[in-house]
């Protein structure tokens, strides 16, 4: 069981309600999609895997912008909400530790936007990044944003994991809006599979 499954966070429609309230208040709720779209424009390609896609907020927005998106998540209640909102998209129920048996394609960019890395079962982070790196085309990007909390995955450890998976660090920001990272409790990291 991963940390997400053992947490008491809202799921499915209840999880989505937070984003609906934010959007209704006028807040931007598509910072992840904005950055991903910009990275794709710069590096080329349109194929995106939203790994740990939850209710599909990012995947659906990227599809609306013309990307070819696959959403993958281990939580059936989150995927049920995603499927109800966008039944035309491909939603895969699978654990990130074992994507190989559920996906056979490669992607231009793989996104882990919703704190996915800190919800993994402790000790599986390397296996997950290895699996995802194997699904990137040469030159493809792995983009992950997650909170930095005591006792959880550190940026140094994440960089070591990415390097062991054959990826090179390209960028690190404090937000999805590309604010400079100078420390703090959140980071967005971009790693690249060498061409």
Image: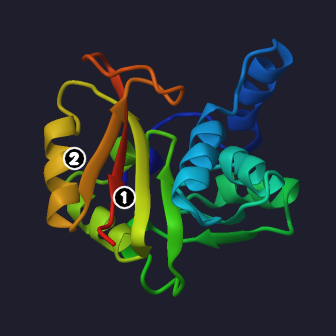
Distance in Å between CA atoms under marks 1 and 2? 21 Å
Q: Which residue is drawn at 35% across and 77% down?
A: 134
Q: Which of marks 1 and 2 is in front?
A: 2
Q: Is residue 47 placed above or below 170 in the rendered structure? A: below
Q: What element carries label 1?
A: loop
Residue placed most toward the observer, 137 or 96: 137
The answer to whether residue 137 shows anywhere in this view is yes
Q: Measured from the top left, where is residue 49 in percent x and y?
A: 56, 64
List x then y, in percent, for residue 72: 58, 65
52 on left or right of 146: right
Q: Is residue 167 above or below residue 152?
A: below
Question: Foreground residue, 183 or 5?
Answer: 183
Residue at point 41%, 56% (across, down): 142
For label 2, count other residues whose C-alpha is less than 10 Å away and answer few (under 14), some (14-19) or many (20+).
some
Q: Which of marks 1 and 2 is nearer the N terminus?
A: 1
- For residue 53, say whether it is visible: no
Q: If the image is split into quadrants, where does the N terminus sit? A: bottom left
Residue underneath mark 2? 158
The residue shown at (86%, 53%) is: 85
The numbered disc on residue 1 is 1
């Amino acid at each position: 069981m991963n940390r997400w499954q053992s947490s008491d966070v809202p799921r499915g429609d209840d999880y989505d309600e937070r984003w609906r309230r934010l959007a209704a208040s006028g807040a931007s709720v598509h910072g992840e999609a904005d950055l991903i779209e910009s990275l794709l424009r710069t590096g080329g390609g349109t194929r995106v895997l939203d790994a740990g896609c939850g209710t599909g907020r990012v995947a659906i927005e990227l599809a609306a912008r013309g990307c070819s998106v696959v959403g993958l998540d281990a939580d059936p209640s989150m995927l049920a909400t995603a499927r109800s909102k966008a039944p035309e998209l491909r939603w895969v129920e699978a654990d990130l530790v074992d994507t190989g048996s559920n996906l056979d394609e490669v992607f231009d960019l793989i996104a882990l936007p919703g704190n996915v890395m800190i919800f993994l079962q402790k000790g599986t982070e390397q296996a997950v990044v290895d699996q995802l790196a194997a699904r990137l085309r040469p030159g493809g990007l792995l983009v992950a944003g997650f909170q930095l909390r005591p006792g959880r995955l550190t940026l140094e450890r994440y960089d070591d994991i990415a390097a062991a998976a054959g990826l090179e660090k390209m960028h690190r920001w404090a937000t999805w809006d590309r604010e400079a990272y100078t420390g703090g409790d959140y980071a967005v990291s971009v790693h690249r599979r060498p061409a």
